[in-house]
Image: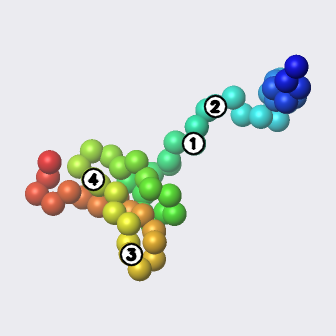
Amino acid sequence: MNIGSLIVLLKLFEGQVSPTIGPPKPEEKNPQNVKLKPLCGAGHYAYKDPLTGLWSCLVIPKGR
């Protein structure tokens, strides 16, 4: 019997565990200078700065 899943279910019903799955949605549509690779909006692409190691969403040159 897996008791670990039972503990998670009990915590879920108590409100200690969030029922959402996956990372939270970003507040910004095209974030700048973040540690993790962002999901960029239409017409933008993710770029990692080699000096700082931070990711930013940049506009695609000449559009797409």
Distance between the Cα atoms at labels 3 and 1? 26 Å
- Look at mark 2 in the image and give the residue it sits on: 20
- The three-letter code of the residue at mark 2 reads Thr
Find out whether the residues at labels 1 and 2 contact each other: C-beta distance under 8 Å: yes
- The three-letter code of the residue at mark 1 reads Pro
Disc 2 crowd, CA 10 A, few/some/many (<14, 14-19, 20+):
few
- Look at mark 1 in the image and give the residue it sits on: 24
First reached walking from the N terminus: tag 4 or tag 1? 1
- The three-letter code of the residue at mark 4 reads His
* Residue lying at 57% horizontally and 42% vertically, measured from the top left: 24
**Number of the label disc, if any, that sits on residue 44:** 4
* Residue 45 % position (x, y): 29, 55
Q: Quadrant of the N terminus?
A: top right
Foreground of the two, 8 or 1: 1
First reached walking from the N terminus: tag 3 or tag 2? 2
Distance between the Cα atoms at labels 1 and 2? 8 Å
